[in-house]
Amino acid sequence: MSINIHIQKKDLWLLSAIVIFLVGVGYVIAYGGNQPSVHGHSAGEVEGTSLGAWTDKDSNGNNLAIDNVYKVTGDGFLIWTTQDQCCPCLRLRIGSTNPPNEINISHGRGWAGGGEIIAPIKKDYYWNATQDKINSCGDYTGAHYFRWIPFGNGVNIKQ
């Protein structure tokens, strides 16, 4: 017993058209569907896929500053830069409670001319930045700069 299948040129065109149609329908469903775990979504349909505009202000319009406690309303990154010439010890505290103390990030003694800490901070977490004084150094004279870079748009920092 033998099975013979004869595909002629006109049948191949029909089969190709059906395959192209089914693949096209699959793409339309994947990018317009409501089950991303099954079908997926385009980058524009996924929330939080890009970084938002950075800010150096809290929700009241005040500059972000050392020794204050802030709460973020969305995930993002904090960049803290100092130009202090006095060998400070920078401490960034992050946590889910106020005052924050779950995560301690420090930039230690023994360096001069400034430094930088970059840290991810989760939604609804608090942070504050402090600087330990070194007795031989006197008062700090350098500037501190804070930049908040959120994931997505419209994320504020509340004091």
Image (spheres, helix red, strand yellow):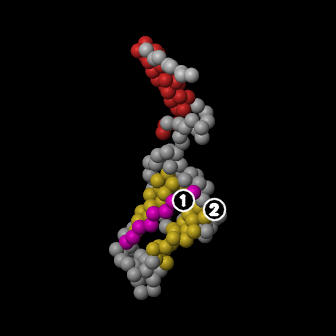
What quarter of the picture does the N terminus occupy? top right
Whether residue 14 is situated above or below residue 49 in the rendered picture: above
User: Which kind of residue does numbered mark 2 sit on?
Assistant: Ser
The outermost residue toward the left is 113
Of 8 and 118, which appears nearest the observer? 8
Residue shown at the point (56%, 60%) measured from the top left? 70
Residue shown at the point (44%, 58%) measured from the top left? 147
Q: Which residue is mark 1?
A: 121
Quadrant position of residue 139: bottom left
Residue 69, can we see it?
no
- In the picture, measured across the screen, residue 65 lies left or right of residue 94, that is left
Instruction: Report helix, strand or loop for mark 2.
Output: loop
Q: Which residue is mark 2?
A: 96
Residue 55's x, y, as percent? 45, 53
Q: Which residues are magenta?
A: 114-122
Residue 98's x, y, as percent? 64, 65
Residue 111's x, y, as percent? 38, 78
Q: How many marks?
A: 2
User: Which kind of residue does numbered mark 1 sit on?
Assistant: Ile
Dot 2, how many residues are within 10 Å of its Cα: few (below 14), some (14-19), or many (20+)? Answer: some
Residue 127's x, y, as percent? 56, 63
Of 2 and 24, which appears nearest the observer? 2
